[in-house]
């Protein structure tokens, strides 16, 4: 079997897109002249398929190319889910259906079941075949998930009977006084009992609570970016690293070090893994885990961090990875097959360095080992690369039945579809 044939087979199994008639054609689609405001490598182009949706977070794509987009709550406006469909084959989503009375970030589609992660629960909707709206109210698969303080978004991934849920930490580094000057860390950190990790639940059951879940992996500050490779069934996650090294520990770090540390990490996640938070962080310059200052570290000491699991790849500090996709399509050139796309929401705390992120990067993975990352899509922020001034901030990534890459944005509510045209 050729790689192209294998790619199509894996895609068919993962998305149930097993009939050629269900795959929307892409060859005749016209990309936007300016690629919807973003810059891509030679040979790629983009079109804006939907705009002004609201705070669009993660995306799920059906076997026929319909999009289901998670919308988070914003101030006094409740989010939910918006379903999108292209009815005339031009690639633009001309039908919108909105449902749900609570917002969230995580979304995943398996057959007729649409799973949706709100801040305190995972819901499941039954979507009729070729439908856009659920047949009835949602079932609660998991309820009473912990919220409060920071990192409340629940993002999800499916693998057979496994429902994986990211439950982010409520603090920066589990200090006695969060984000306070030289406040020591709590040891052991109580957050690790219920948060700062990935939990596994039964995707087929309803009315589960947090206590019914298994802590699959721990020591992960916040993994908004979480996915399962549909070809290998490997669970992957990308972590938001900790903040404020120099602000809280000026005796050990200067402003430049604080802007560049710690690196954002890409993890291959296996049952029982411990990635070290809050006791450790990854020094992307020294390429090792080091002991956090809250626990006696000075920027050099390794200590207990020698026994925790490291990343497969590391990216610049504070870029905020929010979306993750292992590409298993056949449309893009062969070098992209099996590699990781990561959507970075963008930094707020890299001063005195310029703010960074606001892009999508690609990490080549050969035999599970990473090569250096490369920026794949940029220009989302526009003229102001700042959280409050950016036009768009990337969040979700998904692959269409034809192998196109979809990118969502929770600032302007835009969805891009990126295609390979083969023209260099």
Image (cartoon, rainbow, N blue to C red):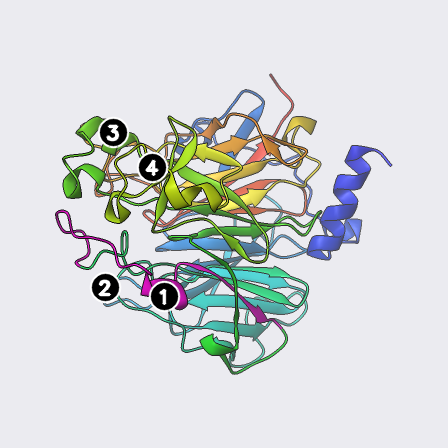
The answer to whether marks 1 and 2 mark residues whose Cβ atoms lie closer than 8 Å is: no
Magenta range is: 177-203
Q: How many marks?
A: 4
Residue that appears at 40% across and 67% down: 193
For residue 92, side relative to residue 19 (left or right): left
Q: Is residue 49 visible?
A: no
**Where does label 2 land, which residue?**
75
Disc 1/disc 2 C-alpha distance (Å):
10 Å
Image: 73 above or below 26: below
If you read the primary sequence from the N terminus, does the residue marked by circle 2 or circle 3 appear first? 2
Task: Residue lying at the far front in this picture: please name it.
Answer: 303
**Where does label 3 land, which residue?**
257
**Where does label 1 land, which residue?**
79
**Residue nearer the viewer, 252 or 397:** 252
For residue 284, side relative to residue 335 (left or right): left
Magenta segment includes 187: yes
For residue 246, side relative to residue 139 (left or right): left
**Where does label 4 land, which residue?**
262
If you read the primary sequence from the N terminus, does the residue marked by circle 4 or circle 1 appear first? 1
């Amino acid at each position: 079997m050729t790689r192209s044939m294998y790619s199509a087979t894996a895609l068919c199994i993962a998305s149930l897109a097993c009939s050629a008639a269900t795959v929307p054609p892409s060859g005749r689609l016209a990309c936007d002249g300016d690629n919807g405001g973003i810059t891509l490598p030679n040979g790629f182009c983009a079109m804006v398929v939907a705009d002004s949706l609201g705070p669009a977070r993660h995306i799920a794509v059906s076997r026929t190319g319909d999009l289901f987009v998670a919308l988070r709550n914003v101030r006094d406006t409740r989010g939910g889910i918006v379903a999108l469909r292209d009815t005339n084959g031009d690639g633009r989503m001309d039908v919108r259906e909105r449902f749900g009375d609570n917002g969230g970030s995580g979304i995943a589609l398996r057959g007729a079941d649409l799973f949706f992660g709100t801040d305190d629960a995972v819901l499941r909707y039954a979507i009729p075949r070729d439908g856009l709206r659920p047949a009835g109210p949602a079932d609660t698969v998991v309820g009473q998930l912990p919220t409060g303080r920071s990192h409340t978004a629940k993002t999800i991934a499916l693998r057979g009977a496994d429902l994986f849920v990211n439950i982010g930490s409520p603090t920066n580094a589990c200090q006695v006084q969060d984000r306070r000057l030289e406040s020591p860390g709590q040891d052991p950190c109580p957050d690790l009992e219920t948060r700062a990790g990935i939990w596994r639940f039964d995707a087929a059951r309803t009315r589960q609570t947090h206590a019914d879940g298994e802590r699959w992996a721990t020591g992960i500050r916040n993994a908004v970016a979480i996915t399962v490779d549909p070809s290998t069934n490997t669970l992957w996650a990308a972590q938001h690293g900790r903040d404020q090294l120099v602000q809280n520990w000026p005796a050990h770090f200067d402003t430049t070090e604080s802007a560049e540390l710690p690196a954002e990490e890409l993890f291959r996640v296996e049952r029982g893994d411990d990635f070290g938070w809050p006791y450790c962080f990854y020094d992307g310059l020294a390429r090792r885990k080091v002991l956090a200052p809250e626990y006696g570290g000075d920027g050099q000491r390794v200590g207990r961090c020698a026994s925790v699991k490291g990343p497969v790849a590391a990216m610049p500090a504070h870029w905020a990875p929010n979306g993750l996709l292992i590409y298993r399509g056949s449309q893009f050139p062969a070098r992209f097959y099996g590699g990781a796309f990561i959507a970075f929401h963008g930094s707020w705390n890299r001063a005195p360095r310029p703010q960074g992120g606001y892009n999508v990067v690609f990490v080549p993975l050969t035999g599970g080992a990473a090569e250096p990352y490369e920026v794949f899509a940029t220009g989302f922020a526009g003229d102001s690369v700042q959280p409050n001034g950016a036009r768009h901030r990337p969040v979700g990534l998904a692959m269409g039945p034809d192998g196109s890459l979809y990118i969502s944005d929770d600032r302007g509510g835009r969805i891009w579809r990126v295609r390979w045209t083969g023209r260099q």
